[in-house]
Image (spheres, rainbow, N blue to C red):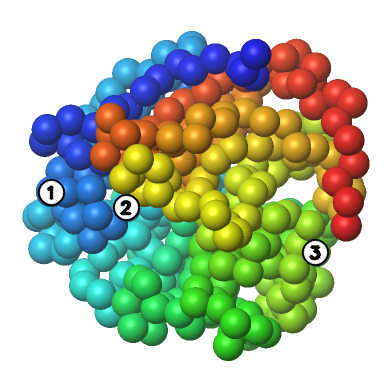
């Protein structure tokens, strides 16, 4: 039996061929906002796309559309996509998203709201230099010190080059300005890889101790660590999380534990990225692991497993009552795994039962 229940399906339509890469935030009154990339000019990453918003007032049991929040057309860019929410030190909500101008210029911006998403400030650049920066959805973190940390992958010749590197942007004034961290990370086995370090993420596992990771085509997520809040980083190394070239997400629960959501089966001879002619990226099953210390993990718990679908670009929110998960879950009827968004709601009691007794993952 699958864990939790599906509360929303955002399927593609004729004038809306893709819905993907969402993020959640919970307002002070318990209202949950969910923003995502709504494509209107095709399903490719560089097709026309806007930022859409939904609102839940019943703890994520249902969501009501709030329409398009920000449009790409009026500002003359190719698209807006890959949103992240963040609670700021000011008490405001921060909304980050990518602005894609062309294949050499894609940057992250931040807007602020003091009224639970009804109005927004002007945009501030969060990757303040020209370049093609990929920042996944639901990726921005605020450390206990108040520092905001933005993990980004820089691509030098467009979105599909093989030399991407992970770097980090920092704000120490609550998002009013950003600068690049002193270190960046490159894959140590770059001559064996066609991807480099892609779609990095970060999570604080101790005061100013940050765990970073990135997807690769080497059969595993690679990881790196910072002991000074993201300024300097260790050399990337293989983690215990086997994977195809697919993003991994990590969330700190209210009870202090960490959960990891990822696709645990790497690509190998005979395992294909396409099923019945539809690209899935080998991104099934979708699984979860849990840790009480950020070092020792138990799992996996299988959440979704249909072989004809791909599950990826997860967003996680631990609310007062349940864990909310949003992720791409497209199949043949959608034309590809990235085109359908799904929201799953898992009550805390159900999650606790599902995570109990999972086996230890081997190093």
Task: Determine whether, in the image, residue 224 is placed left or right of residue 312.
Answer: right
User: Looking at the image, which residue is at 37% across and 35% down?
Assistant: 330
Q: Residues within 10 Å of mark 1 (few under 14, many from 20)?
A: some
Which element carries disc 3, helix, strand or loop? strand
Name the spot of residue 146 as percent of width and height, x first.
66, 57
| Front residue of this view, candidates 11 and 331 | 331
Kindly report the distance in space between the C-alpha atoms of the residues bearing marks 2 and 1: 13 Å
In the image, residue 240 sits, relative to residue 4, either above or below, namely: below
Kindly report the distance in space between the C-alpha atoms of the residues bearing marks 3 and 1: 42 Å
Q: Which mark is residue 81?
A: 2
User: Looking at the image, which residue is at 28% across and 79% down?
Assistant: 104
Q: Quadrant of the C terminus?
A: bottom right
Task: Determine whether, in the image, residue 255 is placed left or right of residue 230.
Answer: right
Q: Quadrant of the N terminus?
A: top right
Nearer the observer: mark 2 or 1; the answer is 1
Q: Which mark is residue 49?
A: none
């Amino acid at each position: 039996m699958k864990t939790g229940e599906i509360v929303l399906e955002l399927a593609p339509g004729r004038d809306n061929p893709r819905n993907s890469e969402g993020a959640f935030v919970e307002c002070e009154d318990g209202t949950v906002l969910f923003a995502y990339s709504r494509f209107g000019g095709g399903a490719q990453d560089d097709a026309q796309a806007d930022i859409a918003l939904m609102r839940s007032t019943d703890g994520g049991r249902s969501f009501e559309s709030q329409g398009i929040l920000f449009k790409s057309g009026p500002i003359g860019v190719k698209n807006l996509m890959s949103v992240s929410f963040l609670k700021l030190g000011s008490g405001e909500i921060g909304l980050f998203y990518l602005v894609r101008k062309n294949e050499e210029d894609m940057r992250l911006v931040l807007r602020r709201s003091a009224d639970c998403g009804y109005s927004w400030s002007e945009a501030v650049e969060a990757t303040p230099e020209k370049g093609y920066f990929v920042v996944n959805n639901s990726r921005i973190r605020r450390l206990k010190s108040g520092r905001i940390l933005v993990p980004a992958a820089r691509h030098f010749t467009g979105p599909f080059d093989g030399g991407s590197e992970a770097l980090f942007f920092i704000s120490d004034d609550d998002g009013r300005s950003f600068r690049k961290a002193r270190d960046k990370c490159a894959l140590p086995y770059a001559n064996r890889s066609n991807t480099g370090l892609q779609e990095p993420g970060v999570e604080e596992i101790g005061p100013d101790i940050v765990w970073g990771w990135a997807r690769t085509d080497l059969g595993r997520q690679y990881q790196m660590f910072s002991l000074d809040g993201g300024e300097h980083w260790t050399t990337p190394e293989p983690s215990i999380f086997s994977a195809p070239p697919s993003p991994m997400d990590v969330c700190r629960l209210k009870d202090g534990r960490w959960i990891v959501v990822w696709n645990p089966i790497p690509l190998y001879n005979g395992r294909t990225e396409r099923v019945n002619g539809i690209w899935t990226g080998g991104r099934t099953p979708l699984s979860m692991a849990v840790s009480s210390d950020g070092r020792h993990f138990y799992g996996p718990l299988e959440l979704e497993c249909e072989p004809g679908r791909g599950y990826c670009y997860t967003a996680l929110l631990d609310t007062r009552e349940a864990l909310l998960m949003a992720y791409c879950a497209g199949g043949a009827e959608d034309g590809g795994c990235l085109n359908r968004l799904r929201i799953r709601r898992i009550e805390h009691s159900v999650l606790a039962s599902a995570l109990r007794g999972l086996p230890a993952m081997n190093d």
